[in-house]
Image (cartoon, rainbow, N blue to C red):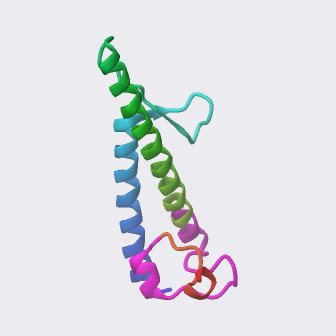
Amino acid sequence: MIDKFLETIKKVLQERLKEIKKQLEEIASKSQRNQKGYDAKFPNYGRSDDENAEEVAAFEDSLSLEKNLESSLEEVELALSNISKGKYGVCETCGQKIKKKRLEILPTARDCMSCKN
């Protein structure tokens, strides 16, 4: 990989990391059980049946979003770790280099297109 390319990718990943953490902080708090995990916040709209139903619906949405964001966070952290270890851009399945174009489109790609298909 070209150093300039890696620096660009690293900046993109670091920005994405900040965005994901910001989004997570809006809907969740750090988990007491899992240091790397988050727990969706349960909203409090009131005591009526309608408000309780809205709370449950909002919590379910937050829970789903939280899980997706956590997964994205792990992918970004792994990609950044691989950059620092010199392992970035290598297919985890076959060990071949992942094409630059794929990494530009999906910086967290872990497999080349041949193995992905």
Residue, far right:
94
Residue depicted at x 31% and y 12% = 48
Residue 112 falls left or right of residue 21: right
Residue depicted at x 36% and y 67% = 12
Indicate yes or no whether the magenta region holds residue 81.
yes
Q: How many numbered circles are shown?
A: 0
Percent of width and height locating residue 117: 59, 83
The quarter of the picture where residue 36 lies is top right
Q: Which residues are magenta?
A: 80-107
Please say if 65 is above or below 33: below
In front: 5, or 77? Answer: 77
The quarter of the picture where residue 28 lies is top left
Percent of width and height locating residue 45: 29, 19
Please say if 33 is above or below 82: above
Percent of width and height locating residue 51: 31, 20
Residue depicted at x 39% and y 51% = 20
Q: Is residue 89 visible?
A: yes
Residue, far top:
47
Q: Is residue 2 visible?
A: no
Residue 98 falls left or right of residue 41: right
Indicate yes or no whether the magenta region holds residue 27.
no
Residue depicted at x 42% and y 87% = 101
Percent of width and height locating residue 8: 37, 75
